[in-house]
Image (cartoon, rainbow, N blue to C red):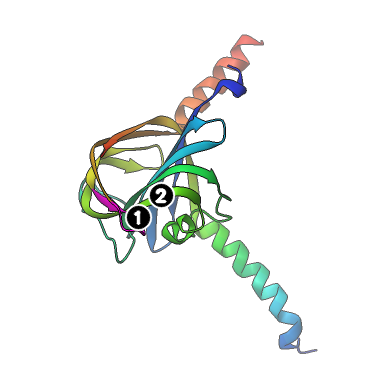
Amino acid sequence: MDPATLDQAVGGFWSSAPDSVTAVWYALVAQTPTTMDLALLWLRKPGATLPPGSYPIDALGRTVLFAFADDVTGFTPPADPAGADLADWLAGVEADHVFLALSGAVQVASAGPFGFTGTFAGTAADASPMLISISGGTFALDGIDVAVEDVNWGDVKATFR
Amino acid sequence: MKPSAKRALPLLAALLALATAAAAQTLPYVGGAVGFHYQ
């Protein structure tokens, strides 16, 4: 695949600290040669796990949020994504609009180091304020399955014997 | 000889940084799909 033809990117991370866990995903979609749309969703909660269930948007505490930046022209990735307040970071993103969730919920089907799946919906606003409604949100992120990697290493060794 | 606090601080900072890196474990999501509608 030619990297020059890529016009979408999806990724994220699971981060566990002694007293909290954070799950984050991002999606970037090129719009024009010089602009892209950026979507972000994150959950940060005390404890060691994010059990399946409904997580209401936490616009004040910023522990459960989604964001949509429309026609981004420039940004600098956060130096420490796991420790950064991503809402603060979004304030520095150069875009036509940066919408942050005001209400709604994230429904987590599964969350952990090897996957993050669920749905989301709600309202979001930018600073103007312009309100948008977000519906039908879905996400399914894949982590690196260490067990599968082990099998692959075994296969590679067998092939070259 | 008793080490001075000034000399001990960089070592303490390095140890704290190592402890923090070990304590916070981050694993990447390397792909998947995301979608939503907005209006």
The crowd level at tag 1 (other Cα within 10 Å; few <14, some 14-19, many 20+) is: some
Is residue A86 positioned above or below A109 on the image? below
- Residue displayed at 27% across by 60% down: A58
Numbered range of the magenta stretch: A123-130
Instruction: Tell me the SS state at disc 1.
Output: loop
Q: Position of residue B37 (x, y in %)?
A: 27, 35
- Residue displayed at 40% across by 51% down: A98
What amino acid type should be assigned to the residue bearing mark 1?
Asp
Q: Which quadrant would the N terminus of chain B be assigned to in this image? A: bottom right
Is residue A88 positioned above or below A52 on the image? below
Q: Tell me if I can see residue A107 in this picture.
A: no
> B3 left or right of A80?
right
Return the residue found at the far right. Answer: B1
Q: Main secondary structure of the magenta part?
A: loop
The residue beneath circle 2 is: A97
Is residue B11 positioned above or below A130 on the image? below
| Front position in the image: A61 or A97 | A97
Q: Chain of mark 2?
A: A
- First-in-chain label (2 vs 1): 2
The crowd level at tag 2 (other Cα within 10 Å; few <14, some 14-19, many 20+) is: some
Is residue A156 positioned above or below A94 on the image? above
Displayed quadrant of residue A34? top right
| Front position in the image: A126 or B12 | A126
Q: Position of residue A142 (x, y in %)?
A: 41, 32
- Residue displayed at 61% across by 18% down: A2
The residue beneath circle 1 is: A126
Instruction: Tell me the SS state at disc 2.
Output: strand
Q: Chain of mark 1?
A: A
